[in-house]
Amino acid sequence: MMNRKIFLLAVVTFLFLQPLALMGASGREALQTTARQVAALGLGFGDYVLGEVLTADQKAFAQKNRVEDALQGTYKFGDGDIVVVVSDKDDIILALYKDNPAATRAQMKEMVGELMMRFSEPTTMAHDTIIYWAYNQNGKISEDEYDFSKQSGETEMIATVKLQSSMPITPDEQPTDSGGDKTGAEKDAVFPGEKAGIYVIISSNPMSRLFLALNK
């Protein structure tokens, strides 16, 4: 009788745990597949590309330059002004960001210029404080495709680059003494002490959702 109970308990445990294990395996495979699709876009800073797995050298560097307050299941490290968020199970790069809480207007313009050089013209802009570069599997999408995707949800964006500023990215034009519009240098001079928080993040919503589902 006791042996039968033990046998039944073993069967029930197996039937319960096996689907969970399979769900975990399939979820991990889905994450890795999505990561490969995202990595193919080549979005990143320096040698770090969203969706790629850290190289041995990068992982060794990461161990020496950890950043605190990492989300459960991840670790973070800094390399200059870049912070990289990585899955601790398979070393996939889940996100990269830069954060300057007290940037001058000149630094903000430099950052916008750097992003446009790297990612070309942005997909869209919002509230004069946010710039998006949005991507599907085939590459960067247009503003019309972005609007359709947001409204219908039928075209899934697999990655975005987002810049957010606490001050307007394009300040209002102010007339010069001669009545014309100010030049770029003259506009900068109007805001000599103005500071802005600037945050740039490269991430993938589908990849993040899969990762979070595996790390509940």
Image (cartoon, rainbow, N blue to C red):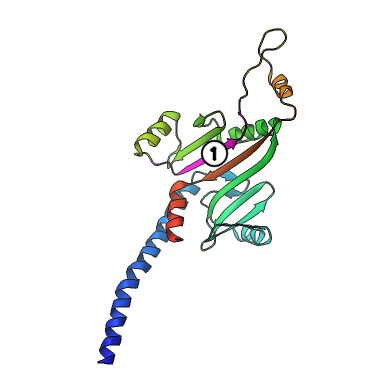
Q: Dot 1, how many residues are within 10 Å of its Cα: few (below 14), some (14-19), or many (20+)?
A: many
Find out whether residue 160 is within the magenta segment. yes
Q: Quadrant of residue 195?
A: top right
Question: Image quarter for residue 193?
Answer: top right
Q: Is residue 175 above or below residue 137?
A: above
Number of residue marks: 1
- In the image as oriented, which residue stretches furthest toward the top? 178
In what quadrant of the picture does the N terminus appear?
A: bottom left
Q: Position of residue 173 (x, y in %)?
A: 63, 17
Give the residue displayed 30% in from the left and 86% down from the top: 6
Instruction: Pinpoint residue 130: horizontal percent, then vertical percent.
Output: 55, 33
| Residue depicted at x 52% and y 30% | 125
> Is 17 left, or right, of 142 in this rendering?
left
Q: Amino acid at mark 1?
A: Lys
Element carrying mark 1: strand
Q: Quadrant of residue 64?
A: bottom right
Q: Is residue 95 visible?
A: yes
Q: Which residue is mark 1?
A: 162
In front of the other: 24 or 37: 24
- Residue 129 x, y percent position in the rendering: 57, 31
Residue at the (53%, 49%) spot, across then down? 50
Q: Where are the magenta residues, as a range?
A: 156-170
Tell me which residue sits at (67%, 51%) in the image.
Answer: 79
Q: Quadrant of the C terminus?
A: bottom left
- Residue 141 included in the magenta stretch of the image: no
Q: Position of residue 39 (x, y in %)?
A: 50, 48
Decide if residue 206 is on the left or right side of residue 71. left
